[in-house]
Image (spheres, rainbow, N blue to C red):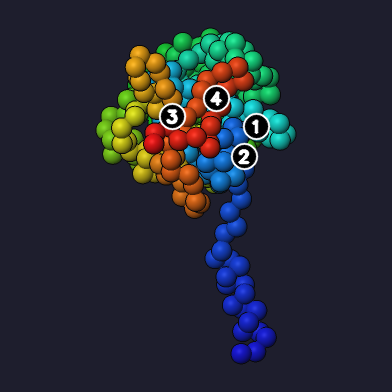
Amino acid sequence: MDVSSLMNIYKYFANVITIVRKIPFGVKGLDDMLKGGLIENRVYLIKGGPGSGKTILSIQFLVEGVKRNENVMYVSLEESIEEVREEMEILGIDTSGISFVDSSFTGEKSIFSEAYLINSELDLQTFKVYLENEIDKVKPKRLVIDPITILRLASKSEVEYRRNLLALITMLRKRKITTLITTEFTGRCVEDYIVSGVIELHCYNVKGRTVRGVKIVKFRGSDFDEVIRPYTIKQGGLEVYSEVKLFD
């Protein structure tokens, strides 16, 4: 085989093989479970019931980006930004470097306020248009949408929701944004099949005491720890104990 043929083969494989780069999530024990962190420019789902710590974990992900001089953005679809900031302040989490976008109907500066007065039926497609405008302003490397549950409930059908969610995820990947979306649905849901990874936050009642556990159920393109590991919510945010099994 001549040199020209070898070079053509090399160029072919260079184009086919994608180099996967990981970025730290920002929570040491969870990064251990993820074998170094999240694969960048992909969309991940954080699942958990009320009080499980989805918002706190998501904010920690953004704070890590701020530490690395990245532009980061948090989009609230439920709580007002004022409430989110207050909750993080109580935990001693500095949110000053995060760009907040209020998409809740209760917030004073909601990006939906004008559209909501005209048409109360807001769906995922409408949200995508608003989000693209905000992304153009901030140009974030990390993004959180918390929670996507609201938009799922507003969709007229699961088929419509799935189609619009795919369009949203495609837009985020094209813009090379590593994104977390959260949901309060703890069972299997349509998002599980579309995103690149799923992290579940569980709360168990053990003899009248709440015991918390984190489990990675899906992580495309990487090895990961499949064991349920305990975590706590304390000053500074979530702490995951990656060397401890929640159940033997």
- Mark sitting earlier along the chain (4/3): 3
Residue 104 seen in render? yes
- Tell me the residue that label 4 is attached to: 238
Residue 248, percent from left and from top: 39, 36
Residue 192, percent from left and from top: 37, 40
- Tell me the residue that label 3 is attached to: 213
Q: Nearer the viewer, mark 3 or mark 2?
A: 3
Residue 45 seen in render? no
Q: Amino acid at mark 2?
A: Pro
| Foreground of the two, 125 or 106 | 106
Q: CA distance from mark 1 to mark 3?
A: 22 Å
Question: What secondary structure is found at the residue carrying circle 1?
Answer: helix
Q: CA distance from mark 2 to mark 1?
A: 8 Å
Q: CA distance from mark 2 to mark 4?
A: 15 Å
Q: Is residue 47 left or right of residue 15?
A: left
The 10 Å Cα crowd at callout 3, few under 14, some 14 to 19, many 20 or more, is many
Q: CA distance from mark 4 to mark 3?
A: 11 Å
